[in-house]
Image (tube, grey):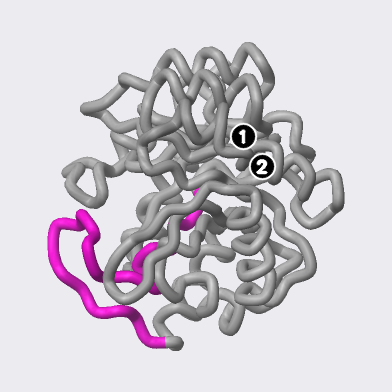
Amino acid sequence: MELRELGQTGLRVSPIGLGTTKLGRNQQVKYPSAFELPSDEAVMALLASARKCGINLIDTAPAYGKSEQRLGELLSDKSDWVIATKVGETFEDGKSSFDFSPAAVEKSVERSLARLRIDSLDLVLIHSDGHDEEILSHSGAVEALRALRDAGMIRAFGASTKTVAGGLIATELCDVVMVSYGRGDHSQRPVLEAAARRGVGVLLKKVLSSGHDSDPAAALAEALAAPGVTSAVVGTMDVTHLADNCAAVERTLQPGPD
């Protein structure tokens, strides 16, 4: 699977990324059916399958329960991966809490480094609670992440936003923006177009509607054809589904006949 430039960050990532919510959290999630957290052996098999398929992008977050910790323990050859995590939201004792202050951002990055057992983070995204404009323009989170990037603790930063207005602000202030985009929801297209104009990297979430889309291949093809998109992050614990998704992406990206 050919890697793509993630905006102007210098990072090169696979067109499909592995979402890891299911590695560490099974409470208050929006998947079609309940599930148990996977065993260490199942996680290692999934990671091996992802690498075999050509995936090098992993998306995690403190809000994903024990996902970061498990990746730190089970992920071998971390230098082969581009690891994206987040700040702003944590999930503990069955509930989420939010703090976008500079002090909280710095502490969150330090915790993520320790949990993932690495010396620097490739990409850190602000995990918005929906108040995108307030967070990006007034909380100090962007400035804190910029300082951490300048200090070498992170390589690039961005925002996982929920509103069009917030996404547009992120394309002005950040290296990367992450937005929802599925076959039934193209509302974020103005953000994609703005990011493409400004050379900002674009990651997509909710491409398969949290497992509710009945045709993953069609959803992935549509998402990756959208303007400026670098990679679509998809979560699964089923190695067969993962292989099928990768095959669909390969077919989508194959050049057509001359």
- Residue 29 sits above or below residue 67 on the image: above
Residue under the point 38% across and 63% down:
21
Report the span colored magenta.
17-39
Side of 182 relative to 57 (left or right): left
Side of 113 relative to 170 (left or right): right
Check contact, mark 2 vs mark 1: CB within 8 A: yes
- Residue 57 sits above or below residue 156 on the image: below
Per the rendering, the mark at residue 17 is none
Q: Amino acid at mark 2?
A: Phe
Q: Amino acid at mark 1?
A: Val
- Please name the residue that numbered disc 1 is placed on: 176
- Residue 125 sits above or below residue 111 on the image: above
SS at mark 2 in the image? strand
Query: Is 34 one of the magenta-colored residues?
Result: yes
**In terms of depth relative to the viewer, which is nearer, 218 or 80?**
80
- Please name the residue that numbered disc 2 is placed on: 157
Residue under the point 20% across and 54% down:
30
